[in-house]
Image (spheres, rainbow, N blue to C red):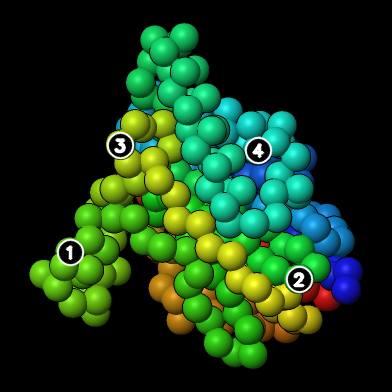
Amino acid sequence: MVLNAKIVGLVDKGIVCEKNDDRLLVEKTIIDSGVYSTVLSTPFHCAICDGVGGESRGDEAAEFVLRQLINEEVNNIDSDAKMSCVLSQINNKLLDYQKREQSDGMKTTIVGLGIYEDKVIIYNAGDSRLYRLRNDNFVQLSENHSVAQEMITMGLITDNIEEELMKCRRITRCLGTKTSAIPYVKQINMHALKDDMYLLCSDGLWGAVVNDDITRILKSEKSLEEKVQLLFEMAENNGSCDNISIAIIEIE
């Protein structure tokens, strides 16, 4: 069964940063600034890369990785095993590019979503996130690759203080490294459902807006364009100190 979806995305450098290290990919279009809207049919793909903060060429890493996804004809990558292999190859290409450019400052997080007629494939490395709202149930589908999450896994802290610790932005995985680039990849063997809403975002959003507020906005009767704008404005008003990338996908 072919599924249709509307996608609205926004990329902004925020009110603090001098440059934008975030990039949004929708099919074969890379957005580095502004608002983007389109309607697609399965299979389709969406991803966000956030060049690692503090690295002078994080924006180049984000752009490079998304262009490699385009070159790989990502809509044909229809299994978690294939996606894991492609992401590993892209990371190796990024490492080679670093050598040619004599710069090891090209690193990036990534979060992506492929929606097919019979399955959904998700993946991430770092702290860019993917959520799903289904029947009023708002859940995070991506993994948290952070020092805080590792401490929770080891039982050193409890998850009720995770969000505060997450604000330190210290990540444990990203693309552009030899030892910590292994992404989380998962295949959900069930097609997306009508009215499902997926949210991809960089830490510029989730680090400034709590889940309850995100859920309230997504569940509102406003248009997708209005929802994206409200999330962006709330992040800025709450003092987001990073670039902000948001993409909402609604299955029609």
Name the residue at 61% across, 71% down.
Answer: 188
Name the residue at 76% across, 63% down.
Answer: 116
Which badge, 4 or 1, is on the more N-terminal residue? 4
Say the numbered circle drawn on residue 151. Answer: 1
Q: Disc 1 to disc 2, how far (Cα)?
A: 36 Å
What is the x, y in percent for residue 201? Answer: 53, 57
Give the tally of numbered discs: 4
Q: Amino acid at mark 2?
A: Asp
Residue named by callout 2: 118
Q: Amino acid at mark 1?
A: Met
What is the x, y in percent for residue 27? Answer: 76, 46
Which badge, 1 or 2, is on the more N-terminal residue? 2
Q: Is the residue under label 1 in contact with that under label 3 (CB below 8 Å)?
A: no
Q: Disc 4 to disc 2, how far (Cα)?
A: 21 Å
Q: Is the residue under label 2 in contact with that under label 1 (CB below 8 Å)?
A: no
Q: Residues within 10 Å of mark 4 (few under 14, many from 20)?
A: some
Q: Amino acid at mark 4?
A: Leu
Of labels 3 and 1, the one closer to you = 3
Position of residue 156 in the picture relative to residue 149 (left or right): left
Secondary structure under the numbered disc 4 in the rendered image: helix
Residue named by callout 3: 179
Q: Disc 3 to disc 4, how far (Cα)?
A: 21 Å
Q: Is residue 165 visible?
A: no
Say the numbered circle drawn on residue 69. Answer: 4
The single residue placed furthest to the bottom in the displayed view is 135
Q: Amino acid at mark 3?
A: Thr
Q: Disc 2 to disc 3, how far (Cα)?
A: 34 Å
The single residue placed furthest to the front in the displayed view is 81
Position of residue 151 in the picture relative to residue 208 (left or right): left
Of labels 3 and 4, the one closer to you = 3
Q: Disc 3 to disc 1, how far (Cα)?
A: 19 Å
Secondary structure under the numbered disc 3 in the rendered image: loop
